Amino acid sequence: MALPPSAPPADSTAPPVQAPGLQGFVFALFFIFGGITSLNDVIIPKLKELFTLNYTQAMLVQFCFFTAYLLVGIPASQLVKRIGYMRGAVAGLVAMMAGCLLFIPAAQSATYPLFLFALFVLASGVVLVQVVANPLISLLGNPATASSRLTFAQAFNSLGTTIFPYVGSILILGSLATVSAADLSGPALDAYRRAESQAIVNGYVGLAAAIAVVALVVWLFRNRLQGERHEPSSMLGGLDLLRRPRFGFGALSIFLYVGAEVSIGSIIINYLMQARVLDAPESTVGWMVSLYWGGAMVGRFLGSAVLRVVNPGVVLACAAVGAIALLAVSAGSAGTLAAYAILAVGLTNSIMFPTIFSLASEGLASRAADGSGLINVAIFGGAVIPLATGMLADATGSLAIALVLPALCYAAIAGFGVFARRPLSVRLHQPL
């Protein structure tokens, strides 16, 4: 998932922070929390099988994870202002480690709600690190090239979302036994859940160890940022921006985009397992989630070139229509065509987040920070839309029909692309 670009530092003429070697570790932050987010797509089918969940219950994984954006985003920004970027990054990494380690008691007790709590703690750390990473990468170099550095950092985020599901599918899904939890009961079921949950524990404990190394390095750099300044936040007073049609529609589009992207990623493994699609077990198709997120990575590089010569609103509308077409092809076909059509939606997703963000934020000027904060909260769509998609799948008994919901989200995004295709300066002189 793309991350919200941050507002530039208040004083864009200030000299860059001199902290040799620090950029590499900031890139590592992007890589780690991008990968952690996409790893949810792997553990959803695992937990669904272990706890014999329906799709609504399984989507609580994404609901608990992305609810952190709604509940933790603003407190995280306040904490960073109090303790600074570097210590804020360490605090976020420690919270991520705690979330990973909470998988141990969750597995030992074989309790689904405890898994959900662990994911919320993990996501809270991700949000805190994310609040730090974007402005920090802007500080580490020439202000004139801040956008270039942020784009490069986003590539590491996409790299994480591509690699983590592939490795996770091997470590987590590869251990699924031939017996199913649905065939067991009583002590045998509890023992099976504890044994199979150990694969999740192994993956996340290893992740905690890697995070610990990064946290230690960031801690060693904690005093490298000198003269760090933070302006008073007006985020809570920025709700009035939602009354501006362009920004309000854009924020809604972010909500819908993240929801649609996460919904599709969350059901891909179960979707591919269906008899009408690939008719294969989790351990065989699990790696294919990487194709979905890898498409977004490739599309980001291609899209950056296209957006230089084609109107961004038009590109956004075309990408959204393309996503709808791919979903329709997948739902109406079978076999490899159905499989690769839904995986190709990742390619159309690639340019959506940054394009929606830039179009919605056009003309905000001094209100850019308020707008960025509100759009960050709109990522909460990753909690709501997947849960609704799961409910629709349960109600209809069909994942293909459930694709209607993300398709409707893309339809609204296409509408925003058409609405925002003209520069704001032109729209100000024409009826809305």
Image: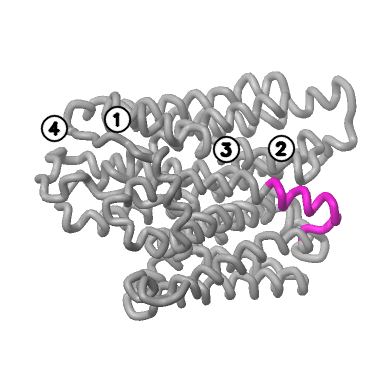
Report the side of 298 relative to 392 (left or right): left
Residue for badge 1: 81
Task: Give x and y (percent) for residue 28.
Answer: 35, 42
Q: Position of residue 399 (x, y in %)?
A: 77, 58
The answer for how far apart the CA atoms under marks 4 and 1 are is 13 Å
Mark 4 / mark 1, whichever is N-terminal: 1
Q: Residues within 10 Å of mark 2 (few under 14, many from 20)?
A: many
**C-alpha separation, residue under disc 2 versus residue under disc 1:** 37 Å
Provide the residue span drawn in magenta: 387-399
At 72% from the left and 64% from the top, the residue drawn is 404
Q: From the image, tell me which residue sits under label 2.
A: 47
Q: Residues within 10 Å of mark 3 (few under 14, many from 20)?
A: many
* Residue marked by disc 4: 227
Amino acid residing under circle 3: Thr
Query: Which sits earlier in the primary sequence, circle 1 or circle 3?
Result: 3
Which mark is nearer the camera, 2 or 1? 1
Q: Secondary structure at mark 4?
A: loop
How far apart in space, not on screen, are marks 1 and 3 (Cα)? 22 Å
